[in-house]
Amino acid sequence: MVCERMTFDYNTCFCYFCLSVTKPNKKMHTTDFKLLERTLFFFYLILIGVGLSVPSDGNHGLLSIKTLSFLLTSLFFFLYLINTPLLTERQFKLCFGSFTALTVILCSLIVSVLRDVTPIFSAIDQCKLLIVTITTLLISITLYSRGLIRFTTLLKTALYSNLLYAACKIFLLFLLFLGVIDLKSLITLLNKRLMTLSFGSLSRLQTSVDIATPFLLFFLLKTKTFDLRLSKPFKIGALLIFCLSIILSFSRYLGAVALVALLLYAVTEPWTRRLKIALCSLFLVSLFVFWVGPKTCIDLLHLRFTSFNNSRSDETRKSQSGSLMAEFLKTPYLGKGIGSSAKEIRDKDLPHSYEMQWLAFLMQFGIVGLFFILGGLFFLSAIFFTKPFDGTKVALGVLLQIFLLSGFTNPYLISLTSGIIYSLFYLGGLKLKEQTL
């Protein structure tokens, strides 16, 4: 009878095991523990803020605000974990998943070292990106499940931070338009990896932070659903700034995501509001076309979709695809190793970075490594497509899949900003699930 109970009482086993591996030898004083929680909360909010407002080129150094905020948040998170008396079953599974991910990264690093064909700086850089992405998500889920942070606080911080970035970006481009500064001066001033393009008096500017804006557009429109109260004038102003920032990024992918976000918002609203949304959208588009000029709009569309430079960009992706697949076929199971590159290199400073990021992962981690990556992403996605169903929750799930699809055309999947995006999606799904229970 005792054996039968021990066999089937999984929750009890989880609790006893978690208690044995997490219970500290000496309990931290309650006052000190509260101070630790507040310090962790403070640095976590700073991490979210800089992750969605400070552009990065991947080589920002140890003393940059991004690196320091991540290291300090991770340090206080580690101190918090070792002084936490008990992990819940969900937290234990999360820690186990994170440990598995770190094991896969370590194994891939060993493969990379043994093959001796990958520059060590490239392997370390990709390791860093993967660890930052996973750790940011782990911290977010743990703090939320422990009640140290509410989703509304996280969402408000994310919206305000990215809104500040978008406003500064528009202001800089306005100065470019007026001729106060030139493009070379702007690049020198920011000292970041930028995607720029000039068209007459108009200029394009895109950085690593821009990837979050179209997804935050959906969260902004659905703040009421997430119990975040923002004034109507603020939401309208933020909506206009976000949309203008996306347009000035001049990215086909970001523009498409923004359109899908607006469409999903309209679909999840009552019929009476859909007509208002359609009329407002038509008015804004007409206003923009009138402001820029119909001929200029046509020329811009031609430049972005049918120009020679655009065709050359697509041809480069096709060439990268063939090179990555050829390299993958040489070592299909374990891959070439983390940080490795194919014969054709996209970026000499970051040789592991490819616009065809999923194919690069397949080449670097092989079939076995990609299986674990997809398993982790399945864990993130499952919450959106399980009961109880909700229109907003399903819409979030669709947007998450669109973000994952970006890996076929853009290197957006791993970074601090990406880790924050994953956190917003997953915790947003948890929030909606809790509301419908």
Image (spheres, grey):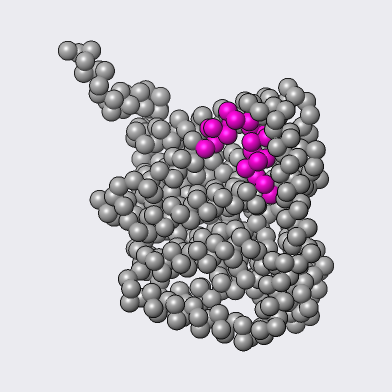
Task: Give above or below for 190 relative to 109.
Answer: below
Left/right placement of residue 210 relative to residue 157 reads right
Magenta stretch, residue numbers: 355-374
* Residue 68 seen in render: no
Q: Pinpoint residue 45: horizontal percent, then vertical percent.
A: 50, 54
Who's the residue at 73% across and 22% down the image? Answer: 114
| Nearer to me, 14 or 28 | 14
Q: Pinpoint residue 295: horizontal percent, then vertical percent.
A: 70, 83
Left/right placement of residue 240 relative to residue 81 reads right
Who's the residue at 50% across and 63% down the image? Answer: 260
Indicate yes or no whether the magenta region holds residue 370: yes
- Specify the quadrant that holds the N terminus: top left
Task: Give above or below for 360 relative to 231.
Answer: above
Task: Give above or below for 116 relative to 424.
Answer: above
Left/right placement of residue 18 relative to residue 302 reads left
Residue that extends furthest to the left in the rendered view of this protein? 1
| Nearer to me, 81 or 311 | 311
Left/right placement of residue 101 relative to residue 431 reads right
Q: Pinpoint residue 188: horizontal percent, then vertical percent.
A: 80, 63
Q: Pinpoint residue 42: horizontal percent, then vertical percent.
A: 49, 53
Who's the residue at 73% across and 48% down the image? Answer: 318
Who's the residue at 62% across and 87% down the image? Answer: 290
Please identify the quarter of the rendering in which residue 436 is found: bottom left
Please identify the quarter of the rendering in which residue 199 is found: bottom right
